[in-house]
Image: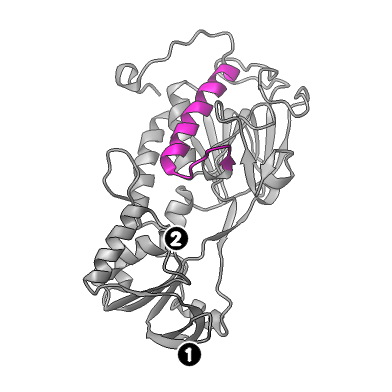
Amino acid sequence: MTQTHTTDVAIIGAGPVGLFAVFQLGMLKVRCHVIDALDAIGGQCAALYPEKPIYDIPAYPSIDALDLVKQLEAQAAPFAPVYHLGQQVTRLIPPPNLPPQAGGGSELLSSSQEGETLATGNWQLETSSGTIIHARAIIIAAGCGAFGPNRPPLDGLEAYEASGAVRYLVTRKDEFKGKHIVIAGGGDSAVDWANVLAPDAASLSIIHRRDNFRAMGDSLDKMNALVTAGKIEKVVPYQLAGLEGENGQLSGVIVSTLDGQKRTLKADYLLPFYGLSMDLGPIAGWGLGLEHSHITINPASCETNQAGVFAIGDIATYAGKLKLILCGFSEAAMAAHKIRNLIYPDVAYHFEYSTSKGVSA
């Protein structure tokens, strides 16, 4: 049965940046509905690495990804967002008065302060579950879009994936205690997980095709200290070449240099961290400016080339963009203030800090 809703803003993506946008909009008395293809809020943080520590959240020297999601959910809760989970936005229909390739957003008609009336300035979203949402503005906070791991091209990989011996994410760190672990990759995920799992592992090897890792400097310092302490073995310059074991139970990982020298590493688990494949899905057909599977925005407002449509977080790009969660939080605040002017164009607003304003749902 089709359900139809009317709101001020529809947020596509319930990850950390989307959740913080709910809070920022709520502080400006703007109502939100949030849509996500996953069955729970939290985006990649909840689905891919709930126990992974995050180090670049202000005031938190370290916070697990799932704990961060819980805090953001609690922060947004006073503003009663409506979540539509387990469904994908399949269609975005612009308002009939939208100028082609507009960028300022001022042409959208204003809603009443209660947002109860449908005017011609509404966008219409349709989801895979038949839900229809009319909204004055759209925020796309979809992270990488539809995501999946980049899988190594190894014979017999599927059997080890099915048994859980080869994994592309860590949901429970305790499963790896006392185990022989091989991690493949040279980026932040590979190095961070090596640092987290090594202290309690029977052994941990990290494979990379060169000695130059791409992770953050502090993470590399921690890894190198664990290498010196004998808790991590750096296997460089090597790459994955094969798997050993029976009936899906892994016993060894074969690695090879570029000139064919091979060795076998003892392994109960292989964790390949080669990044995520990014698929924008239906978003790619919405007439937005795209650059390498990212949405181009005006960094001053986070608005796209379509008036009233904003993009924030990892999916958004502009000159000098940093893919940090805290940058996504900043983008959420900037988009919220621009949208507030679209929703209430005739209402004077005096900016106040939350410390003096407080939270009023």
At a point 30% along the width and 67% down the height, the residue shown is 197
In the image, residue 264 lies at what x, y percent? 41, 87
Name the disc covering residue 247, or none. Answer: 1
Q: Nearer the viewer, residue 148 or 121?
A: 148
Q: Residue at x 55, y 26 (%)?
A: 300
Would residue 40 be seen by someone viewing this image from the given angle?
A: yes
The kind of residue on which mark 1 rests is: Asn
Above-or-below relation of 263 to 347: below
Q: How is the image coloured?
A: one colour
Q: Residue at x 54, y 60 (%)?
A: 276
Q: Is residue 105 left or right of residue 52?
A: right
Q: Amino acid at mark 2?
A: Gly
**Where does residue 356 sit, x and y in percent of width and height?**
31, 16
As drawn, is 25 to the left or to the right of 72? Answer: right
Q: Farthest residue toward the bottom? A: 246
Query: Label 1 neighbourhood size at 10 Å, few (<14), some (14-19), many (20+)?
Result: few
The crowding category of the residue bearing disc 2, from other C-alpha atoms within 10 Å (few below 14, some 14 to 19, many at least 20), is: some
Local secondary structure at mark 1? loop
Secondary structure, mark 2, is loop
Q: Residues at badges 2 and 1 in contact (C-beta under 8 Å)?
A: no
- Above or below, 301 relative to 54: above
* Of marks 2 and 1, the one in the foreground: 2
Q: Which mark is residue 271?
A: none
Assess whether residue 325 is covered by the magenta stretch: yes
Magenta region: which residues?
316-343
Magenta segment, prevailing SS (helix, strand or loop)? helix
The C terminus appears in which quarter of the rendering?
Answer: top left
Q: Which residue is mark 2?
A: 187
For the residues labelled 2 and 1, the Cα–Cα distance comes to 31 Å
Which image quadrant is residue 171 in? bottom left
* Residue in front for this viewpoint, 274 or 23: 274
* Residue 9: in magenta span: no
